[in-house]
Amino acid sequence: MGMSITHLLVIVLVVFILFGAGKLPSVMQELGKGVRAFKKAMDDKEENKE
């Protein structure tokens, strides 16, 4: 049971309503930084296991 295009559009609409068009680029930038930090932490954890 994956995400359909309708689910994605609803999520984008809610984010747009909550943050507005002006803040949306900065919100997406911070989200990208968070995702990169999470991936880096997961990679570091796997390296420590080996």
Image (tube, rainbow, N blue to C red):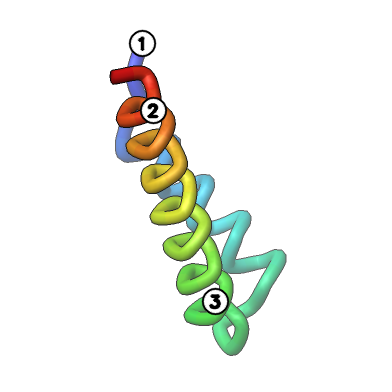
**Residue 22, how many percent across, how many down?**
59, 88
| Occupied quadrant, residue 45 | top left
Q: Secondary structure at mark 1?
A: loop
Q: For the residues marked 2 and 1, what is the alpha-carbon distance in whole angstroms? A: 33 Å
Please identify, in this view, whether the residue under mark 3 or under mark 2 is nearer the observer.
2
Q: Quadrant of residue 39?
A: top left
Relative placement, left or right, of 50 versus 18 is left
Residue shown at 33% from the left, 37% from the top: 43
Residue at (64% x, 78% y) in the render: 20
Picture coordinates of residue 19 (x, y %)? 67, 72
- Local crowd size for mark 3, using a 10 Å CA cut-off: few (<14), some (14–19), many (≥20): some
Marks 1 and 3, the one that precedes in the sequence: 1
As helix, strand or loop, the secondary structure at mark 3 comes to helix
Sequence-first disc among 2 and 1? 1
Front residue of 8/50: it is 50
Total numbered badges shown on the rendered structure: 3
Which of the labelled discs sits on residue 1, or is there none? Answer: 1
The residue at which mark 3 appears reads as 24
Q: Which residue is mark 2?
A: 48
- Left or right side of 1 for 22: right
Which sits earlier in the primary sequence, circle 3 or circle 2? 3
Quarter holding the C terminus is top left
